[in-house]
Amino acid sequence: MIIGLVGKPASGKSSFFKAATLIDVKITGIPFTTIKPNIGIGYVVIDCCEGEFGVKCSPKHGMCKNGKRYVPVKLVDVAGLVPGAHEGRGLGNQFLDDLRQASALIHTVDASGLTDEEGKAVAHHDPAADVAFLEKEIDLWFASVIQRAIHKIGKPGGVSPGQSEMIQILAEQLSGLEVSKKHIDEALRVSSIADVEKFATALRKISKPILIAANKIDLLEAQRNFDQLKQKFAGTLVVPTSAESEIALKKAAEKNLLDYLPGHDFTITDKSKLSSAQLGILEKIQHDVIGKYGSTGVQTCLNKAVFELLNCIAVYPVSDHNKLTDKDGQVLPDVFLVPRGTTVKELAFKIHTSLGEKFIAGMDARTKRKLSADYELKNGDVVEIMHAK
């Protein structure tokens, strides 16, 4: 699973990436600081089932702390987008190409309105305009790809395919965008392929849904604009975010200056180790960000992108449903994030092709009941895949 981080230059997009991954990247107010995409690992947080079973888990990837399991997801921070990107303006072609494999997009918006569409310093810019232009650019990019695919399908002298055949061919042509036949079928319910731009918009919304991270929420101007963003984009998830605050908290936690779990409040462990300036920063974060919005928003964005935009669930595959271990004896070592509706046999294929091919049945660790191939997994399921040797 890949989540793309998008936004205009100087919106705080790379700061969001750093906040989510703690990978040092070049962060400046200069447009196009990100030339090649930054790739890293962020984490979504779930309640671990270790407490329910009375065991201590041993994650192969991520971590588990205080009963919270941190499950890795891949993040891609791409070059800043400017108007005209779909025509190659700025670093548009590269930006869009880097997004091909993303399943969902987090759009980091400068909610303060202190930078224009190209990332230049201004006053009183409407952040809603940034949302509109970025979505338009991605929709037009989709439209250009779809138009090329339709052109290939309907070459002169060829036999025009039927509707179902055309959908199948279109799915093959758009597979590089992580667009499936199911996505196309859904888009066709609201638009015809004949209206390419309208169809492209519908298909993009389905195959690459967007969440808005209303960044720089610690600034007064952003707090004023936040409610307007929510009103103007009522059908879109809009999350108040302060990437800089998240970076500050994680850096302080690394130095054991405070206890902090991403997505939650923090506790200062020893005030004597902090300068008055550092205490002032933490007090501002507490008052202007966490006190008002519950968190810095970075973790909320990641969780909402995976569990709401993509409608995923978390499942624990094990080799022994009684001991909750893998073949090496590690307890609850893996968590898979899969779309809601995934069957136990489909999970087997996701784990390993040969496991799917040799699938016999699943076994529920809670009920000790066998699960048929078409059993739809539920969030938090712990299952053993029984297979032929």
Image (tube, helix red, strand yellow):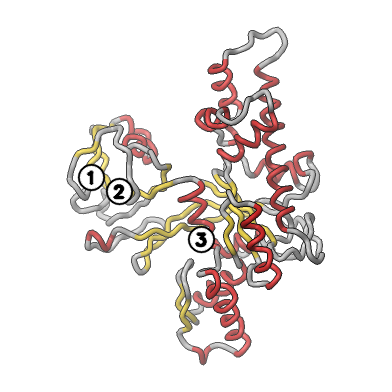
Pointer 3 residue: 300
Pointer 2 residue: 381
Instruction: Check disc 2 and report its element: helix, strand or loop.
Output: loop
Seen in the image, is 107 located left or right of residue 346?
Answer: right
Q: How far is the residue under mark 3 from the one under mark 2?
A: 23 Å
Seen in the image, is 169 located left or right of residue 219?
Answer: left
Q: Are the residues at dot 2 and dot 1 in contact (C-beta closer than 8 Å)?
A: yes
Q: Is residue 115 above or below residue 343?
A: below
Instruction: Check disc 3 and report its element: helix, strand or loop.
Output: helix
Residue type at tag 3? Thr
- Earlier sequence position, callout 3 versus callout 2: 3
Residue 342 makes an appearance in the image: yes
Seen in the image, is 41 located left or right of residue 85?
Answer: left
> Of the residues tagged 3 and 2, which is closer to the observer?
3
- Residue 211 on image: x %, y %: 58, 52
- Residue 271 on image: x %, y %: 51, 89
Pointer 1 residue: 364
Q: Is residue 320 above or below residue 228?
A: above
Q: Is residue 324 above or below residue 263?
A: above
Instruction: Check disc 1 and report its element: helix, strand or loop.
Output: strand
Residue depicted at x 65% and y 18% = 153
